[in-house]
Amino acid sequence: SAQTTRLYSEEDLVVILTSSTIKQSLLNSSTAWLVQFYSSWCGHCIQYSPTWKALGGDVKDWEQAMRIGVLDCAQENNFDICKDFGVHFYPTFRYFKARNPAFDVGQTYRGTDREPQTVRQLMINFIQNQTKQECPATCPGLEPSSSKNILSLIGQKSSQYTAIIVENEDSYVGREVILDLMTYRGLTVKRALSSDKLLVEKLGVKSFPSAYLLHPNGTHGILDVQKRLRFFFSSFLKLLPGVYRKNFSGATPEPLLKGPQGFGNLDAWKDFEKSKVYMADLESGLHYLLRVELATHQTLVGEELSTFKDFVTVVAKLFPGRQSVVKLLETLLEWLVSLPLKKIPYDAILDLVNNKMRISEMFLSDQLQWVGCQGTRVGLRGYPCSMWTLFHVLTVQAARRPDALANTGLEENPKAVLQTMRRYIVNFFGCQECGKHFEEMAAESLPQVKSLDEAVLWLWRKHNQVNRRLAGTMSEDPNFPKTQWPSPDLCPTCHEEQDGIHVWNDDKVLVFLKQHYGAANISPKHLR
Ligand code: FAD
């Protein structure tokens, strides 16, 4: 029942097992498993569930070696299965080997330390102790490499990168990075020990752990990361050009040099910096929204009309754009406010957007020109990317200029921009699946937003939740992998580690978002 499944949901990065799936999942599995048998009425299990979810997210990239599951023994359907597994106390943690040919109750973890870092290290030990027969394809080599093996690679040309984590014997970082990158191709990660004097001297590594990178062209050197932590190493390596997620379900990624074409844009690839926001993306997004997406609605009435009015209000007051575009948005707003109609034919709006009234100095380009939102092929990135970008810019503008919405009826409401976005997405955004998911997230946590700064952070957090869900799926552009953003190279101070788990420094993230999406960071490059 809904009541007993409440502790974990499909959104969580753990596999929810049931009486009808558990035996099948564990039998002959290509991966090892760590399963928590819990009971939804046990207070400790309830308290522990956020930790377990955090662990699930933390080791998501390891899922081809080991998966994390949960099974609720308090659910009536599961009574018998928990008896079969001999589960007497909750929570019970059990490890299961890969390729188990017969039913097996697993190996119990009896330790009292259930901190994610400890559990993660136990997972590594378990994976490492499996034999090659048990996981021929899915267990990456976790043993340290010899200096001979590594030195023979140095200076050689290769079809891919090799990264070597040099670390002390008791460190887990190397194995964590190996597992983090196991679903990526274009790169091999190895580990070596600091006690290997010959190697350490040859590489010139002075502190441990450090990462040493061999490039495909034969050049090599110590990786320069701001903090020598697992998350920094892994993020850096995942973002190397030519490194892609292996299980990427779309077509083989094409190298950028071929001149990718996004959304019918036949021009050559436009270089851009990922530390900037591009006005061309924002204007192209507005053009698409006003002339294409909304134009499929013949008339606006009721909720659609009021959503449209609020949307125009928010952009007219907050869009930090070119004078000619702001003028168009302001004119549109004045027109909407002055016309107390219950129903507006969209053609009338289009006439205005296309400036059929010949109002001077008012203009919105009708060409799609994606820059920071360029996709490697048609159908990737483009418009949805510009939607996110637009609303991040708007939430930041609202926080930086709290008076901007004065006398609009929206000024008292710190959630005004987000609510407008929510209603726009539900009523008009062409991707219905997206709208459904966004609505679920908004219903769950938008009411808690109490200030303009919290609104900025809320959108950032939800966007990362979407990134996490979409990573490795068809809508991911292989050249722009979905990561938890901003990556450490964009904002090193945003990232910290607490009890071995990556955590965000929200204060630093807020400062970063306000800078990144601030008007001064919006580049006019490639504007037509
Ligand atoms: P995007 O995710 O579009 O991000 C654009 C840019 O924003 C990035 O390049 C980066 O510079 C920056 N950025 C990334 N993360 C953050 C962050 N956390 N905070 C601030 N800035 C960030 N697609 C689906 O397939 N299924 C869905 O359910 C779905 N839901 C969506 C819901 C909404 C509301 C929107 C606007 C889009 C949704 N999409 C969905 C589309 C999807 O999220 C991407 O927009 C699309 O796949 C293009 O991805 P992208 O690589 O251009 O990056």
Image: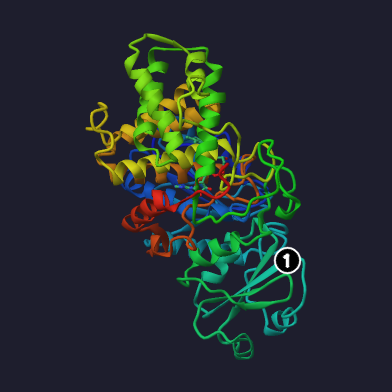
Nearer the observer, 12 or 234: 234
Category of crowding for the residue at label 1, using alpha-carbon neighbours closer than 10 angstroms: few (below 14), some (14–19), many (at least 20): some
Above or below: residue 438 compared with residue 483 = above
Q: Residue at x 37, y 18 (%)?
A: 336
Query: Which quarter of the rendering shows the C terminus?
Result: top right
Secondary structure state at the residue bearing disc 1: loop
Q: Residue at x 40, y 38 (%)?
A: 319
Residue 78: in sight, yes or no? Answer: yes
Residue 15: in sight, yes or no? Answer: no
Above or below: residue 97 compared with residue 229 = above
Q: Residue at x 34, y 53 (%)?
A: 510
Nearer the observer, 72 or 179: 179
Horizontal side of residue 365 vs 220, given as left or right:
left
Percent coordinates x, y for residue 185 in the rendering? 69, 58
Percent coordinates x, y for residue 331 in the rendering? 39, 25
Nearer the observer, 442 or 511: 511
Above or below: residue 386 compared with residue 497 = above
Percent coordinates x, y for residue 71 in the rendering? 48, 41
Horizontal side of residue 153 vs 462, given as left or right:
right
Nearer the observer, 230 or 27: 230
Q: Residue at x 33, y 18 (%)?
A: 337
Horizontal side of residue 397 vs 59, given as left or right:
left
Percent coordinates x, y for residue 492 in the rendering? 43, 64
Query: Which quarter of the rendering shows the N terminus?
Result: top left
Q: Quadrant of residue 381?
A: top right
Instruction: Name the colour scheme.
Output: rainbow
To which residue does mark 1 refer?
A: 160
Kind of residue indicated by mark 1: Gln
